[in-house]
Image: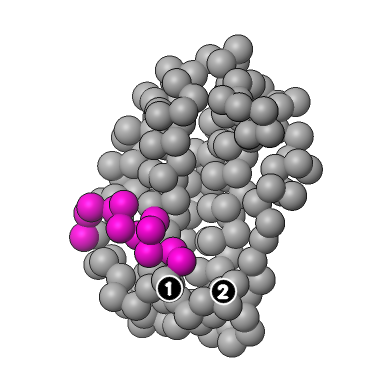
Amino acid sequence: MSSPTNTAGYFNRYIQLVTEQDASIAFTKQWETLKPFFGTIDEAKSTYAYAPGKWTIKELLQHLIDSERIFSYRALSIARGEQANLPGFDEDAYALKSEANARSWQDLVDEFFTVRITTMQLFHSFSKQALEAKGKANNNQITVSAIAYIIIGHCTHHEHILKEKYL
């Protein structure tokens, strides 16, 4: 799966964080770095928030899980020919309802990697034509291929935040 050529403005900030030209390689490399990185965070540290009103590490990971599911749904919908504008979502409202802090860190990590496996399988299943399909999500024109890079870049963005502000 090659780098996207048709991207949506807002999401370019995530796409630009992906240095690999092939999303399959980028997904694999990210897996290989996140697995040990998440292992450096223990249960006590996972409830840390760097400032009042900011998400805890658990809430941030739950945000990644929720977002990846939503982005994957968008990719599937567009690949299958959906013409409707797919809705956006309020990440802060989702975080408030997530109850992430009541879960164990390991449970969240396991869920993240389970979701990531299904995401990689989904994108692997798409034909070249499906990857080039165009649709609209949150009022932005987007291709299925671009969504793969958004998922990867979004995760990279939050990994940087974790390293800079939390750990």
Q: In the structure shown, which secondary structural element does the residue marked by tag 1 occupy?
A: loop
Horizontal and vertical percent for residue 23? 30, 58
Horizontal and vertical percent for residue 71? 54, 61
Q: Residues within 10 Å of mark 2 (few under 14, many from 20)?
A: many
The front one of 160 and 149 is 160
Is 111 above or below relative to 165? below
Q: In the structure shown, which secondary structural element does the residue marked by tag 2 occupy?
A: strand
Residue displayed at 22% across by 54% down: 20
Q: Is residue 4 visible?
A: yes
Query: Magenta stretch: dominant SS?
Result: loop
Is 7 above or below relative to 112? below
Look at discs 1 and 2 and give the one toward the viewer: 1
Does the segment drawn in magenta span residue 66? no
Cβ–Cβ under 8 Å for marks 1 and 2: yes
Image quadrant where one finds the N terminus: bottom left
Is 121 above or below relative to 141? above
Does the segment drawn in magenta span residue 16? yes
- Amino acid of disc 1: Ala
| Span shown in magenta | 10-21
Q: Which mark is residue 137?
A: 2
Structural distance between the alpha carbons of marks 1 and 2: 9 Å
When asked about the image quadrant of residue 34, the answer is top left
User: Who comes first in sequence, dot 1 or dot 2?
Assistant: 1
Q: Which residue is mark 1?
A: 8
Image quadrant where one finds the C terminus: top left
Residue displayed at 74% across by 49% down: 93
Image-based side of 139 in relation to 16, left or right: right
Horizontal and vertical percent for residue 49? 60, 25
Is 90 above or below relative to 115? below
